[in-house]
Image: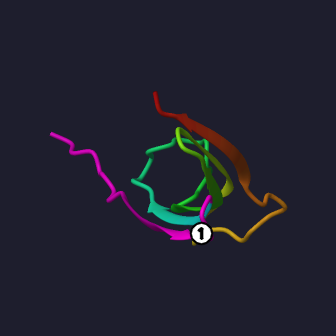
Amino acid sequence: MKMKKVGLAFGVGGIKSLGKKASGMLEFMNLAEDSYGDLLGDADSMLLLGVRFREASTSWDIGAMRPLSIHETPDEFIAFPFVKGTFLF
């Protein structure tokens, strides 16, 4: 019986307050082998950087995530931008 090779996936990050209504965010994720197929190419990990704006019942995250690889040199691609809204009701 052939066993499928599975990689270790983990993430670590943090949030730092930048004032009453804003926070900075940073996260690093190590990806399991073949977890995203060809979507990210040869990327071994992801780096996310952003800012969170908070209100009483909403928050907005604006940032970027960049695939990282130890197997290839960086090209012209910089990062995927993202915007996320959270509404509490």
Residue reaching furthest right?
76
Q: Quadrant of residue 22?
A: bottom right
Q: Residue at x 79, y 58 (%)?
A: 77
Q: Which residue is pictured at 71% across the width and 71% down the height?
A: 73
Most distant residue in the left direction: 1
In this rendering, is residue 41 above or below 86? below
Q: The N terminus appears in which quarter of the rendering?
A: top left
Q: Position of residue 66 (x, y in %)?
A: 66, 59
Instruction: Report the residue marked by disc 1.
Output: 71
Q: Is residue 62 above or below residue 14?
A: above
Identify which residue is drawn at 41% across, 53% down: 33
Magenta span covers which residues?
Answer: 1-21
Q: Is residue 46 visible?
A: yes
Disc 1 crowd rating (10 Å Cα; few below 14, some 14-19, many 20+) is few
Residue 43 on the magenta span: no
The amino acid on which the numbered mark 1 sits, given as a three-letter code, is His
Please provide percent x and percent y for residue 78. 78, 61
Left or right placement of residue 66 versus residue 44 in this view: right
The residue lying furthest to the top in this view is 89
Q: Is residue 19 magenta?
A: yes
The reply to whether residue 66 is in sight is: no
* Nearest the eye: 3 or 75: 75
**Location of residue 36 in the rendering, given as x and y in whole percent from the top left corner:** 50, 43
> On the rendered structure, is 35 left or right of 4?
right
Query: In the displayed structure, would residue 40 be above or below residue 23?
Result: above
Q: Main secondary structure of the magenta part?
A: loop
Query: Which secondary structure lies at badge 1?
Result: loop
**How many tags in the picture?**
1
**Residue, x 21% and y 45% (percent of image)?**
3
Name the image quarter holding residue 68. Answer: bottom right
Residue 59: x %, y % from top left: 58, 44
